[in-house]
Image (cartoon, grey):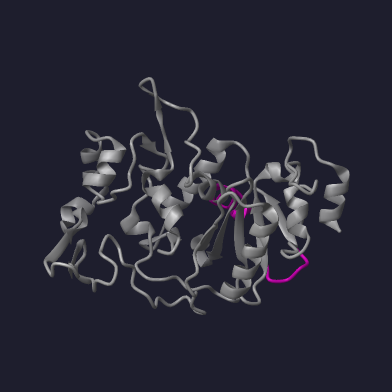
Amino acid sequence: MKLTSLDIPSTVSAIESITEDIPEGAAIEEIMQGLKCWKNPIDKFTVLRLHRTADPRKRTQEWLETEKAGMDTATWMREMELVWEALDGRPVYGEEWSPEFHVSKTSLGWNPKLPVCRGWDFGLYPACLFAQLMPHQRLFVLRECIGESIDMERFKEEVNRLSQEWFPGAVFYEFIDPTGLNRFGSDGRSYAVQLSAKPIRAKYIIPGANPIPERQKAVVDFLRAHIKGLPGYLVDPSAEVLIKGFNGGYFYAYSKGTLKPKPEKNIFSHVHDANQYLCSRVLNVKLTTGYSTARMVEPRFGNKRPSDLERLRA
């Protein structure tokens, strides 16, 4: 299991600098916007990381649209955004995502007065994403928990432990894969019912959108949002798998010269599915720290066992 185990601060203030594309242990100096400097700890050479934003002319939307027109997205991410994990194919969010804009330069804190939203994807490679909807509908992605070949029972235990460690006393909302209402784990219970039982004891379970275009559009809407010059979608640097997926790991592959209709299923796709379920419904739910206003939202497809829904409403 891949877990993010950084301690999370108790306030929204930034306390920890992100170490981006530099050797571990090197001290980074930001000389100006788009220009960072550090010394290689091995050979002591001075390294300069020059991003396009160092040139004010290359920060404009007009310049971006002109230059992107002659370059595929993967090449653009590598050559212009200095993102080395960009893969062949077409990144799902290549036109809207910018690591310089959407990844926080410091560790994000959480607000104890607001609920914590958890996005879930189930299966052998489960993922859970932790986020908060801040004032002005800004979505802060705070942490991620990624499983690999692990059963749901063990994964729930880890998510519950980390939830209490990172967000003590928080009220949680669960945004899930809608098929989790009628997909059953090894114990014969649906994944939604499993979340309502120990140790998670979920009070609010909201199925996300099922159609992929609808889910992706919800993420794109957040990525495109600018609130007084600030990103409407901001990711903590500790969410490494989510970020690398945005950078190109979550992509449409080519088959015989044409793009496949669905993104590739890989280590990045599961946490991005969880992110989509959360983004697709978080603005439709009245989030509260009390236990009186939220309700179960039923999708309009599939067959659901009455006993499962009854237990969720109990």
Q: Position of residue 210 (x, y in %)?
A: 63, 39
Q: Is residue 284 magenta?
A: yes
- Quadrant of image for the N terminus: bottom right
Compared with 76, 126 (above or below) is below
Which span of residues is magenta-colored?
275-293
Left or right: residue 205 versus residue 161 is right
Number of numbered discs on residues:
0
Residue lying at 26% horizontally and 42% vertically, measured from the top left: 76
Q: Is residue 279 magenta?
A: yes
- In depth, the one of 239 and 134 nearer the eye is 239
Q: Position of residue 206 (x, y in %)?
A: 69, 52
Relative to residue 303, is residue 96 drawn left or right? left
Q: Residue, x 60% and y 50% (percent of image)? A: 126
**141 sits left or right of 34 in the view:** right
Which residue of the protein is positioned furthest toward the left in this rendering?
45
Q: Position of residue 197 (x, y in %)?
A: 78, 60
Q: Quadrant of residue 30?
A: bottom left
Query: Residue 38, percent across and down?
Result: 18, 69
Locate the C terminus by quadrant: bottom right
